């Protein structure tokens, strides 16, 4: 019988304060991230109940979900989001929590700033009142999204009660094709095993394709774990991870770095570790992906055709496909390539890092956004925005006809009036395409930054490989 342990098991056991029985554990939380929705609400609950924050030095806050991305957003408008930001600002100050405010170095989408500031560390447990907290698994953190009552519980106790999940390993082998990105890899996986395929599992992504992937690409992979049904997605730390984390503001320094590094190097899954489920993916089979329906699992290669519900093997699935096609306004059997688009959104916690903007700019450079298409670039943080401007990427986008915006979640969550109009079609680098996600009646196609930029230039869903060629 194998005695090997998975990466997940090692980190979980290190943080288990108590075994509560029936598969439940009391887990210590190393980092708690707060934003203007669940964070402000959780802090208000703590204050209303006369409690204090147990470890304010382990909590970090930033307004991101409801802030405007407009260039003039610092002008008061009376929008409800301004109260949410004020509440987060005031309550963070009350409890001594570090807040990264709008316009300040460090501000941005909570899942972008955690890694870039070194708040996210390998082998740590990190939680946030947001389902895409699994993003931080790309740096080897055990991270997941929590509910509003759990936010208040973590604030008051620095612990969380959690059921231990099963383990799954998804191994990527093979040679990646031209034009294929981490976003394409994870969308393909979701299409293969479904949005419930990871339910009840902590998913570890492994294999030579993952090992060769930069840290920011790994975060994109882990970001969509929740769209696979898994709360937790993680990648074991290695030299790529350590190089990314080293020197960041909140990363360990000096002797503490040496001690941390020694621990981190022991974390990867043992060679004889046994997972509850194994999935093997040949990356060579994957082409640039685009969703066609109202679920991330409704995805095809850009050279594919819209599925025909008549080919479904049961009535329930046929009805789901018919409803998705009706909402999206697509014809069964028609090519997805060439479908006209109205909007393009490049941003969100999935794809708004500097590497994402570089990929989009490489497609946009020397070209123009098609007539009738409104295209936005929303950097994930002040640091990303500054880096892009230092490289001149903002000028590339502006020259091509893109709107260059301020950091925030923006059109991903359709907040602050930043929405796609009813029946408008949007190619988006975000993570969700369900009915109404980007606004009532909005039709969303998920894709990589390069594919989104190609759609903006072509004015239709386009194969970036052909555009670049």
Image (cartoon, helix red, strand yellow):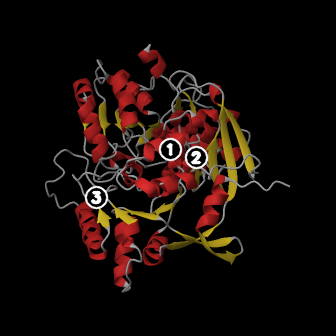
Q: Quadrant of residue 462?
A: top left
Q: Residue at x 31, y 47 (%)?
A: 381
Residue 384 image point, x, y percent: 31, 41
Q: Which mark is residue 235?
A: 2
Residue to which mark 1 is pinned: 241
Badge 3: few (under 14), some or many (20 or more) residues near its Cα, within 10 Å?
some
Q: Earlier in the sequence, mark 1 or mark 2?
A: 2
Of 14 and 393, nearer the camera is 14
Label 1–label 2 contact, CB within 8 A = yes
In the structure shown, which secondary structural element does the residue marked by tag 3 occupy?
A: loop
In the rendered view, does 190 fall on the left or right side of 291? Answer: right
Residue 286 image point, x, y percent: 60, 28
Of 366 and 426, nearer the camera is 366
Quadrant for the N terminus in the image = bottom right
In the structure shown, which secondary structural element does the residue marked by tag 1 occupy?
A: helix
Residue 161 image point, x, y percent: 58, 73
Q: Residue at x 31, y 33 (%)?
A: 375
Q: Earlier in the sequence, mark 3 or mark 2?
A: 3
What is the distance, in whole Å, between disc 3 and disc 2 at their CAs? 27 Å
Residue furthest to the front in view is 255
What is the distance, in whole Å, between disc 3 and disc 1 at their CAs? 24 Å
Q: Relative to 343, say whether 413 is above or below.
A: below
Residue 9 image point, x, y percent: 67, 59
Q: Earlier in the sequence, mark 3 or mark 1?
A: 3
Residue to which mark 3 is pinned: 100
Please state which of the two labelled residues, at mark 1 or mark 2, is closer to the viewer: 1
Please state which of the two labelled residues, at mark 3 or mark 1, is closer to the viewer: 1
Badge 2: few (under 14), some or many (20 or more) residues near its Cα, within 10 Å?
many
Badge 1: few (under 14), some or many (20 or more) residues near its Cα, within 10 Å?
many
């Amino acid at each position: 019988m194998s005695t090997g342990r998975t990466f997940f098991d090692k980190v979980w056991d290190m943080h288990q304060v108590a075994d509560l029985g029936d598969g439940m554990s009391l887990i210590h939380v190393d980092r708690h991230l707060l934003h203007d929705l669940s964070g402000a609400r959780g802090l208000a609950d703590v204050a209303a109940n006369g409690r204090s924050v147990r470890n304010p030095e382990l909590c970090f806050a930033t307004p991101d979900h409801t802030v405007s991305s407009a260039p003039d957003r610092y002008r008061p408008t009376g929008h409800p989001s301004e109260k949410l930001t004020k509440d987060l600002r005031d309550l963070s100050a009350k409890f001594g929590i570090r807040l990264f405010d709008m316009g300040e170095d460090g501000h941005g989408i909570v899942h972008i700033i955690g890694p870039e500031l070194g708040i996210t560390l390998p082998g740590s447990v990190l939680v946030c009142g947001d389902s895409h907290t699994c993003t931080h698994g790309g740096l080897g953190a055990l991270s997941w999204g929590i509910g509003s009552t759990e936010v208040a519980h973590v604030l008051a106790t620095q612990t969380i009660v959690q059921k231990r999940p099963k383990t799954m390993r998804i191994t990527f082998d093979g040679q990646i094709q031209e034009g294929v990105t981490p976003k394409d890899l994870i969308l393909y996986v979701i299409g293969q095993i479904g949005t419930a395929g990871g339910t009840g599992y902590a998913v570890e992504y492994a294999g030579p394709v993952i090992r060769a992937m930069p840290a920011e690409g790994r975060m994109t992979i882990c970001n969509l774990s929740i769209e696979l049904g898994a709360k937790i997605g993680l990648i074991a730390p290695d030299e790529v991870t350590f190089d990314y984390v080293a020197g960041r503001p909140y990363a360990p320094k000096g002797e503490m770095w040496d001690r941390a590094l020694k621990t981190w190097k022991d974390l990867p899954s043992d060679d004889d570790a046994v997972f509850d489920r194994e999935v093997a993916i040949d990356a060579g089979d994957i082409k640039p992906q685009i969703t066609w329906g109202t679920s991330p699992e409704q995805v095809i290669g850009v050279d594919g055709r819209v599925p025909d519900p008549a080919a479904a093997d049961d009535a329930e699935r046929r009805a789901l496909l018919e409803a998705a096609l009706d909402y999206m306004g697509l014809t069964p059997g028609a090519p997805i390539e060439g479908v006209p688009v109205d909007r393009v959104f490049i941003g969100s916690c999935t794809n708004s890092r500097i590497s994402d903007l570089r990929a989009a700019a490489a497609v946009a450079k020397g070209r123009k956004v098609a007539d009738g298409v409104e295209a936005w670039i929303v950097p994930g943080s002040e640091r990303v925005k500054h880096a892009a401007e230092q490289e001149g990427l903002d000028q590339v986008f502006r020259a091509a006809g893109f709107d260059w915006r301020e950091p925030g979640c923006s059109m991903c969550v359709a907040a602050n009036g930043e929405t796609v109009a009813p029946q408008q079609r949007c190619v988006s680098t975000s993570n969700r395409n369900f009915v109404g996600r980007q606004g009532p009646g909005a039709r969303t196609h998920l894709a990589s930054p390069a594919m989104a930029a190609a759609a903006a230039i072509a004015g239709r869903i386009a194969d970036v490989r052909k555009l670049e060629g």
